[in-house]
Image (cartoon, rainbow, N blue to C red):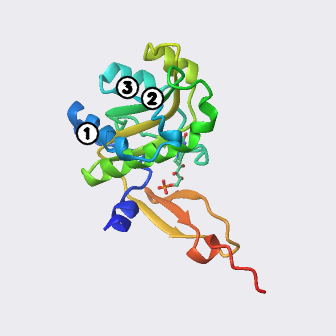
Amino acid sequence: MLKDLLISSRSYRSFDESVKIPYETLCDWIDHTRYCPSSINLQMLKFCIVTEEAVCDALLSCTRWAGKLKDIHLPPKGNAPVAYIVICSDDAVIANAESFQKDVGIVAQTVMLAAAESGFGGCMIGSFSKDKIAALLSLSDHLTPQLVLALGKPNEEVRITEADADGSVTYYRENGIHYVQKRPLEDLIIQERKR
Ligand SMILES: Cc1cc2nc3c(=O)[nH]c(=O)nc-3n(C[C@H](O)[C@H](O)[C@H](O)COP(=O)(O)O)c2cc1C
């Protein structure tokens, strides 16, 4: 069921480094995005796969994780992602990348669901230095990193939990378990105006 896959596809920030993801598997996850809707059907996003350990290490240092958990360094040492997919906009297809941010979200979630279906997982990382990553990956000038997908075999537990009584939501860790609060359905649906 799609909902079960969605529930299992949490943001994971600790990985078993001994479990690698084959390059072909990463390509297959990207292949899923070919069936995504795309603004004006331009399909202007490109994907840079990173699996080489030294490059993964360097890429990790360009990213920031779980900013709300001030006292915890994630991913824990020795539990880093084993692969990355860097989603890039391609100015050679269309110059104004800003209006295509919605496409980025759609393809990102598609890759994460494909990963979850294959028994892997990861975290979308939006907090990173575009310039540093572009330089690290020797990206051509027309490619701009828009979102980083950090991937691996998760080795931590993430549980969905309810919103606070006042309706606020966040994420937190207790006894090594990561809890992520989700709003209830009734808070999401805008009530029809009474006539
Ligand atoms: C566009 C986007 C950017 C994100 N950027 C980061 C990030 O830079 N660092 C991080 O640790 N998590 C990042 N996340 C993960 C969110 O923190 C996470 O989705 C949220 O806490 C809810 O947890 P869940 O994905 O398990 O439902 C990002 C998520 C999205 C959708």
Residue placed at 49% from the left, 26% from the top? 61
Residue 46 lies, in percent from the top left, at 42, 29
Q: Earlier in the sequence, mark 2 or mark 1?
A: 1
Residue 53: where, in percent of width, then height?
Answer: 31, 23
Q: Amino acid at mark 3?
A: Cys
Q: Quadrant of the C terminus?
A: bottom right
Q: Is residue 152 above or below residue 141?
A: below
**Count of numbered circles in the view:** 3
Q: Which residue is mark 2?
A: 60
Q: Badges 2 and 3: C-beta atoms under 8 Å apart?
A: yes
Q: Is residue 155 visible?
A: no
With respect to residue 165, does 11 lie above or below? above
Task: Tell me if mark 3 has few (under 14), some (14-19) or many (20+) residues whose alpha carbon lies within 10 angstroms of its own.
Answer: some
Q: Nearer the viewer, residue 190 or 132?
A: 190
Residue at coordinates 31% horizontally, 49% vertically from top-left? Answer: 114
Label at residue 12 = none
